[in-house]
Image: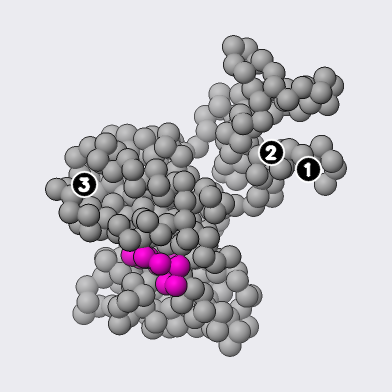
Amino acid sequence: MPAMEQRFAQLTVARPFEVRRSELTCPGHSAKMMQKAAGSGADEVIFDLEDAVAVSMKTAARASVVEALNTLVFGNTVRAFRVNGVRTAWCYRDVVEVIEAAGKNVDVVVIPKVESPDEVRFVDHLLSGIEQANGLAPGRIKLEALIESARGLLAAREIAESNPRMASLIFGIADYAGDVGAKGFVDQPYAAFHYPRAHVVAAARAAGIAAIDAVTVQFKDLARVAQDANDGAQLGFDGKWAIHPSHLAPIHAAYTPTRAEIDRARQVMDAYAKADVQQGLGAIVLGDEMVDAASLRVEWKKLAVARKAGLVDEHFAWIGA
């Protein structure tokens, strides 16, 4: 990489990443719902073996998830499944049975109710052994951790930094509300839960991984989904959980830069590059806005998401792969 391009990469903390504007979850025992999810256009689809599956169905649901992962067409969608919690009787077999049978078609394992780095490492060790035994590429399968309790929140940074497989932290609002004794989590979630949300974002950012916002439980209220998504984007989240395909449009709208934002980001990046090379300036005035290195991180992210989402074709050297 030429020297100037390398400088921009350092300023913007450019690194390869998956776009996770939306993570659509559906029950792992429902073939119909999994098929619909796979073709929904979500950035990531999560087949759930935990909360969405009754205790009596948990063992049978593993086979349904394996069948879905091995037969459905996902396009560019990230393929994930959520195991049961590490402290339950089902987690071990969830990992072993699904990865041994469908590991080549799994991109992410989602771990719920994570409260310590040891839980992440436990799943990592299982995955590493299965990869070695089955000829799967070491470390290709990533991990996402749900932060759903006070203990999990206070350990969020250590959890985020615990393993090279870590791809994101996800805030689980319902379980968190129950754990801390909140009266509820449906009304005004952003006022009541601003601190844990901001903490999850900061922990994820410190580790260089994605931060995913909580689900909107009023799944028929698309205006509420849009409001929650926009609030999360303003706070710094990379995307949001969805529980119905109808949520994807408002979520993508909130987490995808507009054409005007893309054009503005190009202008800022190009102007800064020219000022650096031609005038040796590290801070410039563009219109009525002061632009310096701090501005580049915001604009870089917009262009990176736009490129990954197919909205820009050209490769910007400072965006990353």
Q: Amino acid at mark 1?
A: Gln
State which quadrant residue 61 falls in: bottom left
Give residue 191's position: percent from left, percent from top: 27, 36
Residue pointed to by mark 1: 6
Q: Which contiguous range is marked in magenta?
A: 110-119
State which quadrant residue 55 falls in: bottom left
Which element type, helix, strand or loop, lies under badge 3? loop
In the picture, the disc for residue 11 is 2
The residue carrying pointer 1 sits among few (fewer than 14), some (14 to 19) or many (20 or more) residues within 10 Å by Cα, namely few
45 in magenta: no
Q: Is residue 131 above or below residue 69?
A: below
Q: Is residue 242 above or below residue 160?
A: above
Q: Is residue 190 above or below residue 143?
A: above
Q: Is residue 136 above or below residue 309?
A: below
State which quadrant residue 279 falls in: top right
In the picture, the disc for residue 146 is none
Residue in the picture at 37% in, 56% down: 154
Residue pointed to by mark 3: 185
